[in-house]
Image (tube, grey):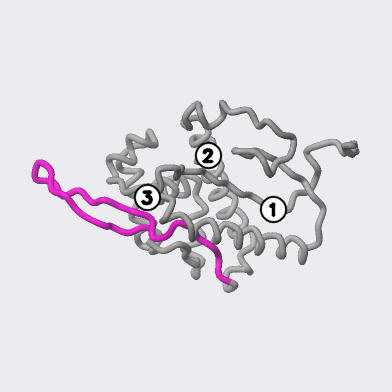
Amino acid sequence: MKQAMALTTFEQLKAISDPLRAEMIMKLVETSYTGQQLAVLLETSRPKIHYHLKELEKNGLIEVIRTEEKNGIVQKFYRAAARGFFPSEDLLPYAEELSESTRQLYVQMANKTKSAILTAPESSFAKAAGSTDPKDWDKVGSIWEISATEADFQEFIQGLFGLMEKLRERSEAAEDDPNGRLYHFSAYGFEIDTPSFDHVEMDEED
């Protein structure tokens, strides 16, 4: 599976803009499923799931990674072609479809984060922070709304991915370390029209 895949055709963009297909892709990023398993998981009819699987496979967004025979029927196991998808510059003229496809993927990512929060062990949230300095925390949950120029925002994004890459480089060693733990990270940053919070001046600590 690729880390990221560029969407290069309008058909790919349309295929991923459908909410159900976006949800199917996110499930197939996690692990492989048959059409029957997806139908049960998403509480949707098998014919509908199989129709959407064909559309996603036709556009190269998912692929069959193995087959198994059960009761004389060959079952196909599908997996997403990549962990993430991004539009190529050729698709910029399709602003409406581009916006909707990205929105649907973000919604599914947010749902995945919600599921991770609800199923995390009690120990994940039981420890007290013990400090008002975020640098000392063993978990973080924050929502920020910050005014910035596009250049400042892009510089921040590059720095954020640089930090994640540094942590990723240590990941393999941590898997064999008895002190190693598995952490869930979610990051969203996008332009909005109106603020969600009233502006409040924060007091400086002595």
Circle 1 SS class: loop
Give the position of the N terminus as an image quadrant: bottom left
Counting residues from the N terminus, which is met first, the one under dot 1 or under dot 2? Answer: 2
> In this picture, is 35 found above or below 101?
above
Circle 2 SS class: helix
Counting residues from the N terminus, which is met first, the one under dot 2 or under dot 3? Answer: 2
- Residue nearer the viewer, 84 or 74: 84
Amino acid at circle 2: Asn
> In this picture, is 160 found above or below 7?
above
Residue appearing at x 35%, y 48% in the figure:
31
Residue lying furthest front in this view? Answer: 178
In magenta segment, residue 76: yes
Spot occupied by residue 184 in the image (x, y as percentages of width and height): 51, 43
Q: Residue beneath label 2, please? A: 111
Amino acid at circle 3: Asp
Q: Give the prevailing secondary structure in the magenta stretch.
A: strand
Residue lying furthest bottom in this view? Answer: 90
Spot occupied by residue 116 in the image (x, y as percentages of width and height): 49, 36
Q: Residue beneath label 3, please? A: 176
Judge the density around disc 2: few (<14), some (14-19), many (≥20) Cα neighbours within 10 Å. some
Amino acid at circle 1: Phe
Residue appearing at x 36%, y 58% in the figure:
62
- Residue nearer the viewer, 19 or 146: 146
Residue appearing at x 27%, y 40% in the figure:
36
Spot occupied by residue 41 in the image (x, y as percentages of width and height): 36, 36
**Magenta segment range?**
62-88
- Residue nearer the viewer, 62 or 98: 62
Counting residues from the N terminus, which is met first, the one under dot 1 or under dot 3? Answer: 3
Quote the CA–CA distance across marks 2 and 3: 30 Å
Quote the CA–CA distance across marks 1 and 2: 17 Å
In magenta segment, residue 42: no
